[in-house]
Amino acid sequence: MNERAAAFASRLQRQGMGFGIVTICLMLILLFGEARRWGHIATAAIGFIVLFLAAYMLFEAALFRLIASKPSEEEGCRAVDKLLAKLHLRRFPQATRMLDARMAGTNRLLLKLHLAFVVFLVLFAGITTYGLWGHI
C-alpha cells in the first residue's frame, strides 16, 4: 500500500468535504435572504463552481485511494488509467503517469478550489455586510 497516496487522498477528502459543507451552508443562508440582486446571483454562481470543484476533489481522492490500495505505485497508477478509460473520461495513455505528476496536477486543481472559495467568501461577505447596513 502506498502511504503517500493514502495520505494525499485523505487530505483531498477532508478539504473537499470541508469546502463543500461550508459552501452549502453559506448558499442556504444566501437563499433564505430577502434580496435577490445581481450580487446574489454572482455569489450563487461562484458557489456552484466551488461545489463542483469540491466534488471533483472527492473524485480525485477516490482515485488516489485506488492507487494506494495496489501493491505498487505503478500498478495503482495503471489501474486509475484503466478506470478512467473505461469511464470514457480519458484515453488510455501510452505511458503511465506516476504519482508525483498526478499529485502536481491535483495540487493545481486544489489551488483553483481555494481561489474560487476565496472569491465566494469575499462576495458573500460583501453581500452580507451591505445587506446588514440596509442598502439592498
Image: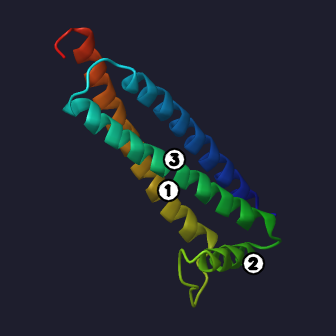
Quarter of the picture containing the N terminus is bottom right
Query: Label 1 to label 2, Cα distance in Å?
Result: 22 Å
Which structural element holds mark 2?
helix
Query: Label 3 to label 2, Cα distance in Å?
Result: 27 Å
Which residue is at a point 31% across and 35% down the rendered structure image?
A: 43
- Residue extending farthest left: 135
Q: Which residue is mark 2?
A: 75
Q: Position of residue 115 (x, y in %)?
A: 37, 44
Circle 3 packing at 10 Å, graded few (<14), some (14-19), many (20+), is many
Which residue is at a point 49% across and 56% down the rendered structure image?
A: 107
Quarter of the picture containing the C terminus is top left
- 92 lies left or right of 52: right
Q: Which residue is mark 1?
A: 107
Total number of numbered discs in the rendering: 3
Position of residue 42 relative to residue 98, above or below, is above
On the image, which quarter does residue 130 sit in? top left
Q: Earlier in the sequence, mark 3 or mark 2?
A: 3
Amino acid type at image mark 1:
Asn
Q: Position of residue 15 (x, y in %)?
A: 57, 42
